[in-house]
Amino acid sequence: MVDGLKIGRPKRDSDGVLYHPITCLNPKCRYHWEQAVEPFPKKCPKCKVDWSLLATRIKTLRAERGLSQAALAEKTGLSLEYIAKLEQGQRVSPSLPALVRIALALKVKLRVELDR
């Protein structure tokens, strides 16, 4: 798995070319494509959200405040598994209420941008 993308086992097409099936793990996207060459993309070309940036930011802010994942989970009312998956980039497309709770627990501003 790479930053919210599931990269499947390589397969061969009818011409003998090796390719990897790739699926976006964003539940609202689930875009699927096949790619023959590496490097693999870091984000889905359809939903264009790089969830690894959010994962890294949450982990960094939590560590700066001396909180464990369990402590952050307790402060937010979210599960430890949810926090862990967010920080690992495995949980994509978190809800706005969940992000608000995390921002409040970390005592930071939450900014959402809608850009063209």
Image: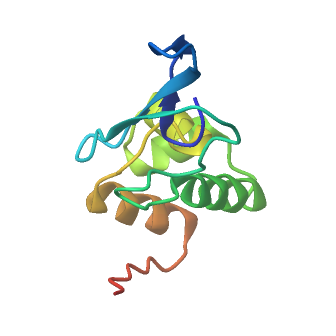
**Residue 3: which quarter of the image?**
top right
**Image x and y of residue 56, in percent:** 66, 55
Counting labels gives 0
Quadrant of the frame with the C terminus: bottom left
- Residue 4 at x, y = what percent? 49, 41
Q: Is residue 102 left or right of residue 94?
A: right
Q: How is the image coloured?
A: rainbow
Q: Residue furthest bottom?
A: 116
Q: Nearer the viewer, residue 74 or 69?
A: 69
Looking at the image, the residue that sits furthest to the front is 15
Camera-side residue of 17 and 26: 17
Q: Is residue 9 visible?
A: no
Residue at 55% x, 42% y is 89
Asked whether the viewer can see residue 62, the reply is yes
| Quadrant (top left/top right/bottom left/bottom right) for the N terminus | top right
**What residue is drawn where x is 59% and y is 52%?**
52
Image coords of residue 68 (percent x, y): 67, 41
Depth order, front residue of 19/47: 19
Percent position (x, y) of residue 50?
52, 58
